[in-house]
């Protein structure tokens, strides 16, 4: 996943419990980071620690809108991919001629 640097960041609203907000506010002071940066770091760590498929998230981040049925079919296929599915098994070099 992109490390979050050099990206235009958006402003978003979220609903969060007061206890978690208090913890985030303290972490902000301790780590000298914004709450957004703390959340980004936590999400990246969650994806890494849970060994979630980063390719899935990259695809979903840039995917065009599709209807719910198509989305369910694609998600089911992507969820079933394993690390073995993502390994390169063969390489081919393509050549093309210009006219």
Image (spheres, rainbow, N blue to C red):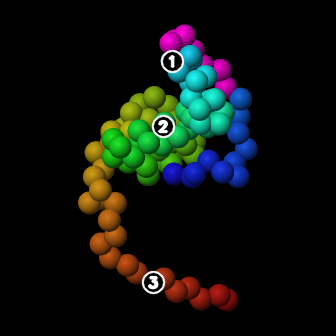
Task: Single out the mark in the foreground, 3 or 1.
Answer: 1
Residue pointed to by mark 1: 20
Looking at the rendering, the stretch of residues picked out in magenta corresponds to: 12-19
Q: CA distance from mark 2 to mark 3?
A: 37 Å
Q: CA distance from mark 1 to mark 2?
A: 15 Å
Residue 25 occupies quadrant: top right
Q: CA distance from mark 3 to mark 1?
A: 52 Å
N-terminal of the two: label 1 or label 2?
1
Residue pointed to by mark 3: 93
Q: Is residue 94 visible?
A: yes
Q: Is residue 37 left or right of residue 58?
A: right
Q: Which percent across, then down, holds residue 97?
A: 59, 88
The residue shown at (53%, 40%) is: 41
Q: Which percent across, then down, holds residue 84?
A: 26, 60
Q: Of helix, strand and loop, which mostly describes the magenta segment?
A: loop
**Residue in the foreground of this view, choosing between 13 and 61:** 13
* Element marked by disc 3: loop
The residue shown at (32%, 65%) is: 87
Q: Is residue 52 visible?
A: no
Queried whether the magenta region covers residue 96, the answer comes back as no
- Quarter placement of the C terminus: bottom right
The residue shown at (28%, 52%) is: 82
Residue 31 occupies quadrant: top right
Residue pointed to by mark 2: 43
Q: Give residue 61's mark.
A: none
N-terminal of the two: label 3 or label 1?
1
Q: Bin the neighbour count of mark 1 within 10 Å (Cα to Cα): few under 14, some 14-19, many 20 and up.
A: few
Task: Single out the mark in the foreground, 1 or 2.
Answer: 1
């Amino acid at each position: 996943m992109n490390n979050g640097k050099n990206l235009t960041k958006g402003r978003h609203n979220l609903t969060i419990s007061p206890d978690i907000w208090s913890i985030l506010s303290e972490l902000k002071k301790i780590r000298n980071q914004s709450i957004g940066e703390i959340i980004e770091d936590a999400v990246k760590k969650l994806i890494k620690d849970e060994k979630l498929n980063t390719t899935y998230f990259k695809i979903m981040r840039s995917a065009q809108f599709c209807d719910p049925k198509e989305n369910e079919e694609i998600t089911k296929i992507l969820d079933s991919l394993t690390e073995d599915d993502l390994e390169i098994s063969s390489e081919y070099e393509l050549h093309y001629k210009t006219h």
